């Protein structure tokens, strides 16, 4: 496949480049690679090293993203390349997110072929996921443009660490997003992710303003971001800056990568977060990475069971014409 010149960079003196894709604004000298590991300065031009070269391509249930209010029960063709602009101690996909671009076997899968495979396997959407899709921005954007022409939905599963200009361009083509809001604490972002909180909050505001279907995931890590005060502040920010109807997924942490000495999240801690979120006024709160009734969707008005889930499987849907089948309360989401 031909090498793809990256978008969104500025040429400085002496063939030095500044990448403008994410808030890191990497200064990249000739023959060097940016912080994400996949954007290289070659002869004074910035190139994506992973265009059309995913290391993972699968057909996933939409619930795995997780998206619970967006085409439930449907399949999503899911792709991801190596690289990430975060370096989280607890990364669950660190074997590919932190890998060198030539350190993992990739698949030859250009945008046109991604769309063709999505149609072949009757996937209603394409998800840009597994690692951080921002780092394979050009690949994602070109694929999303082709998918949109074929009436296939586009989904990003992202850390939200992207600059406003590329995000606004992407918003023209994506339909849904799950953003990982890792903590409502800038120190957590600096210490655990080597990043910052504010750009992520800005991304959330933009996605909401642009009417992209939005769900949020918060991975609870014992003693790091699971204090009542932290959880309450996060939930209040969502309610006050976005919408009380945005689904919030609290996810269970398991020790891995550079966080193997940390404790796994207890069910009691997850349940406590659920109670706090509901007390703040969030309407749709879920617990992930653990089997429980907290995977189900209930009507916020009459508490009727609307969607019954078993892990990533849908057992029952009681939503018709976007309303609760029992009390006719409107249930927010993209249901068909």
Image (tube, helix red, strand yellow):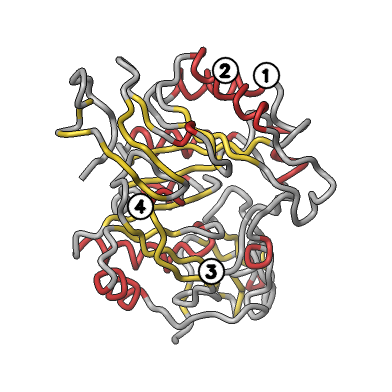
Q: CA distance from mark 3 to mark 1?
A: 36 Å
Quadrant in the picture for the C terminus: top left
- Which residue position is annotated with label 2? 276
The residue closer to the viewer here, 11 or 133, is 133
Tell me the CA gap for discs 3 and 4.
Answer: 21 Å
- Circles 1 and 2: CB distance less than 8 Å? yes
Residue at the spot of label 1:
228
Residue 267 against residue 75 in the figure, above or below: above
Q: Quadrant of residue 27?
A: bottom right
Q: Position of residue 328 (x, y in %)?
A: 18, 20
Residue for badge 3: 81
If you read the primary sequence from the N terminus, does the residue marked by circle 3 or circle 1 appear first? Answer: 3
The vertical placement of 169 against 55, above or below, is above
**Mark 4 or 2 closer to N-term?**
4
Circle 4 is placed at which residue position?
A: 169
Mark in front: 3 vs 1: 1
Task: Tell which tag, 1 or 4, sits nearer the viewer.
Answer: 1
First in residue order: circle 1 vs circle 2: 1
């Amino acid at each position: 496949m031909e090498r793809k010149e990256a978008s969104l960079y500025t040429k400085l003196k002496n063939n030095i480049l500044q990448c403008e894709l994410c808030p890191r604004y990497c200064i990249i000298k000739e023959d060097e690679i940016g912080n994400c590991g996949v954007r290289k300065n070659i002869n004074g031009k910035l190139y994506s090293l992973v265009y059309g070269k995913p290391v993972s391509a699968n057909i996933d249930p939409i619930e795995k993203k997780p998206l619970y209010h967006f085409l439930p029960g449907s399949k999503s063709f899911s792709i991801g390349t190596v690289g990430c602009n975060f370096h989280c101690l607890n990364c669950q996909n660190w074997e590919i997110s932190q890998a060198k671009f030539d350190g993992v076997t990739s698949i030859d899968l250009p945008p046109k072929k991604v769309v063709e495979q999505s149609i072949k396997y009757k996937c209603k959407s394409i998800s840009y996921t597994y690692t951080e899709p921002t780092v394979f921005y050009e690949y994602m954007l070109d694929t999303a443009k082709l998918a949109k022409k074929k009436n296939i939905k586009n989904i990003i599963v992202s850390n939200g660490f992207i600059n406003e200009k590329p995000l606004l361009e992407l918003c023209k083509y994506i339909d849904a997003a799950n953003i990982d809001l890792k903590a409502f604490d800038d120190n957590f972002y600096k210490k655990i992710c080597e990043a910052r909180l504010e750009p992520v909050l800005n991304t959330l505001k933009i996605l909401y303003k642009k009417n992209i279907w939005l769900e949020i995931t918060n991975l609870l890590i014992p003693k790091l971001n699971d204090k009542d005060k932290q959880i309450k502040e996060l939930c209040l920010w969502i309610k006050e800056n976005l919408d009380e109807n945005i689904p919030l997924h609290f996810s269970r942490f398991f020790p891995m990568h550079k966080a193997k000495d940390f404790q796994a999240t207890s069910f009691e801690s997850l349940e406590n977060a659920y109670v706090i979120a509901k007390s703040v006024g969030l309407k749709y709160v879920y617990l992930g990475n653990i089997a429980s009734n907290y995977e189900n969707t209930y009507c916020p008005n009459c508490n009727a069971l609307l969607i019954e889930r078993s892990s990533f499987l849908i057992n029952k849907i009681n939503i018709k014409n976007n309303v609760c089948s029992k009390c006719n309360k409107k249930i927010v989401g993209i249901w068909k």
